[in-house]
Image: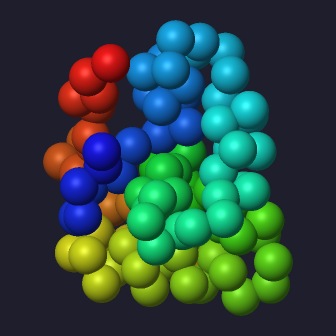
Amino acid sequence: MIPAGRVTTYRILAEAAGNAAACRAVGQILKRNPNPVAVPCHRVVCSDGGIGGYGGSVPGQIRRKVRLLRSEGVEITGGANPRIKFLPDVLFVDFRK
């Protein structure tokens, strides 16, 4: 449901699923995503704007997540610790159950 060019957080996604405390569980589920093209888990980030994990955090995958987000128009700042620039402007929260 998260459109290209927008992101949501692990917490917001957990809240949308009915359990705000399940942020880590959301991360674990996304880590095991067998089809990241159809289910674009790269659009889920940390509440503080940090990129979070991707692909089980295999080396090089964080850079791939950054590239994917940038290719969709999401601005990223920070080299070694990438973060979403202007997080409130690209934050998607409208999950309809």
Q: How is the image coloured?
A: rainbow
- Find residue 54 and report its image quarter: bottom right
In this picture, residue 6 sits left or right of residue 12 = left
> Could you tell me how many numbered marks the image carries?
0
- Relative vertical location of residue 17 with respect to residue 72 in this rendering, above or below: above
Residue nearer the viewer, 58 or 97: 97
| Residue 47 visible in image | no
- The location of residue 22, given as percent across then percent down, is 68, 22
In this picture, residue 65 sits left or right of residue 73 = right
Q: Residue at x 78, y 65 (%)?
A: 56
- Find residue 26 and report its image quarter: top right
- Relative vertical location of residue 40 with respect to residue 88 in this rendering, above or below: below
- Relative vertical location of residue 82 with respect to residue 20 in this rendering, above or below: below
- The location of residue 78, given as percent across then percent down, is 50, 74
Q: Residue at x 70, y 70 (%)?
A: 55
- Relative vertical location of residue 52 with respect to residue 95 in this rendering, above or below: below
- The location of residue 20, given as percent across then percent down, is 57, 15
| Residue 97 visible in image | yes
Residue nearer the viewer, 93 or 87: 93
Quadrant of the drawing holding the C terminus: top left
Q: Residue at x 52, y 11 (%)?
A: 18
Quadrant of the drawing holding the N terminus: top left
Q: Residue at x 43, y 21 (%)?
A: 16
- The location of residue 40, given as percent across then percent down, is 44, 62
